[in-house]
């Protein structure tokens, strides 16, 4: 599994497919935070919302890098579970590589300030909340990107529709007044909690929601792959 993950990451970087999502993330975060001067928790909560489609797109690109024939050979050689887990591990590692960038860049463009009013979260706590928000969004984005990958959807148009539909649907259904908020990944809910100052209960609830949503998405990905491999 580890060898398969390394192979996927090497192919992803060597073919330069890692550059488009990296550039898109840098541009989006720079435009978002340029001179904004928000508190750390609020700024990072919004960063996680913006980074969600970038991470999902990156996952799709990474999983689509491997040719179909090579993927089938890896299934035969290593087993279906190891091959599937290797791809998801590679996607998770690639996503984790963007998290430090998303945490550091807002400081470089003046998008984050320290506490300056009574009631503002301490800077250390704000950074912790920001890290939690990004780590919460990562598995959700990996799950959506996997569902939109070629191995699950076969046709490029179907994959694009799944990716765009998942992102837009996640945003729309995640609005505060949504009638079905539990269907959406908790991306906007995390941003709202980060801005308001999360409590222990909200952190546990949103983390559980994200893990359940990610598990359901990855189970769907595994099922679709079995049907199409």
Image (tube, rainbow, N blue to C red):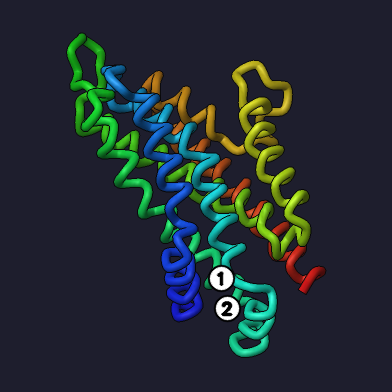
Q: Position of residue 110 (x, y in %)?
A: 23, 23
- Identify the residue at image location x=43%, y=52%: 19
Q: Residue 121: image x %, image y %?
A: 25, 22
Q: Which residue is mark 2?
A: 82
**Is residue 154 depicted above or below 33 in this figure?**
below
Label ID, residue 132: none
* Residue that carries the numbered disc 1 in the rendered image: 85
Label 1: which secondary element: helix
Please tell me which residue is depicted at 70% across the width and 61% down the height of the picture: 150
Q: CA distance from mark 2 to mark 1?
A: 5 Å
Along the viewing direction, whichever of 56 and 143 lies nearer the viewer: 56
| Along the line of sight, the residue nearer the viewer: 66 or 96 | 66
How would you rate the neighbour count of disc 2 (Cα within 10 Å): few for under 14, some for 14-19, many for 20 or more?
some
Q: What crowding class fits label 1: few (fewer than 14 Cα within 10 Å), some (14-19), or many (20 or more)?
A: some
| Labels 2 and 1 touching (C-beta < 8 A) | yes
* 67 up-or-down from 132: above or below: below
Residue 38: image quadrant is top left
Residue 200, quarter of picture = top left
Q: Quadrant of the C terminus?
A: bottom right
Residue 101 locus on image (x, y percent)? 31, 44
User: Could you tell whether 135 is left or right of 71 in the image?
Assistant: left
Q: Quadrant of residue 169?
A: top right
């Amino acid at each position: 599994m580890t060898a398969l993950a390394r192979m996927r990451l090497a192919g992803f970087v060597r073919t330069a497919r890692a550059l488009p999502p990296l550039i898109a993330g840098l541009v989006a975060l720079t435009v978002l935070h340029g001179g904004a001067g928000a508190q750390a928790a609020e700024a990072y909560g919004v960063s996680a919302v913006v980074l969600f489609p970038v991470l999902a797109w990156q996952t799709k690109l990474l999983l689509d890098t491997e040719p179909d024939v090579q993927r089938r050979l890896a299934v035969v050689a290593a087993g279906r579970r190891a091959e599937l887990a290797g791809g998801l591990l590679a996607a998770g590692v690639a996503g984790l590589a963007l998290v430090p960038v998303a945490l550091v860049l807002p400081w470089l463009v003046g998008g984050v300030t320290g506490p300056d009013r009574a009631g503002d979260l301490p800077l250390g706590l704000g950074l912790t909340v920001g890290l939690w928000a990004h780590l919460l969004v990562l598995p959700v984005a990996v799950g959506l990107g996997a569902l939109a990958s070629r191995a699950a959807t076969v046709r490029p148009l179907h994959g694009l529709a799944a990716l765009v539909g998942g992102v837009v649907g996640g945003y729309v259904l995640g609005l505060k007044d949504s009638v079905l908020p539990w269907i959406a990944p908790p991306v906007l809910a995390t941003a709202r909690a980060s801005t308001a100052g999360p409590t222990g209960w909200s952190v546990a609830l949103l983390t559980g929601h994200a893990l359940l949503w990610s598990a359901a998405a990855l189970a769907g990905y595994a099922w679709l792959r079995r049907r199409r491999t």
